[in-house]
Image (tube, rainbow, N blue to C red):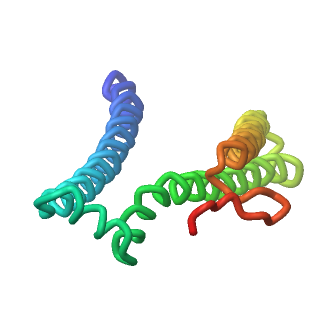
């Protein structure tokens, strides 16, 4: 009967990792389908034009400018989303790590809280650094506006 209790943690940990893998796959599949759908809509829209001059006329119209802007805006929106989620993740991990360390100082006096707190705190700080680097790189690549507020947008 004691051998059965050994299997429970193994199944629980395996189930946890399987669940995380499934969640990641579902999110990735959803993003892939959304990108595929956008590509199909854009392809169908381009295919509707019978000649190059007709397509050029469309691109010079207000709707055409919006169509082209959607291509340019996608990387910028993705960069902003990554930075925002990085800041959120950094805050959550850092505060959670500090909470574990505070519990150890006030109540438990258990090494487990110190180890968990230190790991979570380090992950939070690492995520903060990674988010800062992403922010700086996005700005230097022109995905975000420059710091002085001047616009790099050269569109008429």
Quarter of the picture containing the N terminus is top left
Is residue 57 found left or right of 122 in the rendered image?
Answer: left
Q: Position of residue 48 (x, y in %)?
A: 12, 63
Residue farthest top in this picture: 3
Identify the residue at horizontal 27%, vertical 58% (top origin): 38
Q: Is residue 21 above or below residue 38?
A: above
Q: Position of residue 52 (x, y in %)?
A: 21, 56
Residue furthest to the front: 53
Q: Quadrant of the C terminus?
A: bottom right
Q: Would residue 108 appear left or right of 89 to someone viewing this image? A: right
Residue 104: x and y in percent read 82, 46
The answer to which of 80 and 76 lies nearer the viewer is: 76
> Relative to residue 3, is residue 41 depicted above or below?
below
Q: Is residue 16 above or below residue 45?
A: above
State the residue at coordinates (20%, 58%).
46
Left/right of residue 116 with respect to residue 31 in the rendered view: right
Q: Position of residue 145 (x, y in %)?
A: 71, 59
């Amino acid at each position: 009967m004691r051998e059965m209790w050994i299997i429970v943690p193994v199944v629980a940990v395996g189930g946890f990792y399987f669940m995380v893998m499934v969640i990641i796959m579902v999110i990735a599949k959803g993003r892939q389908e959304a990108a595929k759908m956008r590509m199909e809509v854009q392809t169908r829209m381009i295919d509707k034009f019978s000649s190059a001059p007709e397509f050029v006329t469309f691109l010079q119209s207000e709707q055409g400018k919006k169509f082209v802007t959607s291509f340019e805006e996608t990387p910028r929106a993705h960069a902003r989303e990554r930075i925002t989620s990085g800041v959120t993740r950094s805050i959550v991990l850092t505060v959670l790590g500090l909470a574990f360390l505070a519990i150890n100082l006030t109540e438990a006096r258990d090494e487990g809280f110190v180890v968990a707190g230190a790991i979570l705190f380090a992950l939070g700080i690492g995520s903060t650094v990674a988010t800062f680097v992403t922010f700086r790189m996005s700005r230097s690549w022109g995905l975000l506006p420059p710091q002085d507020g001047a616009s790099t947008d050269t569109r008429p």
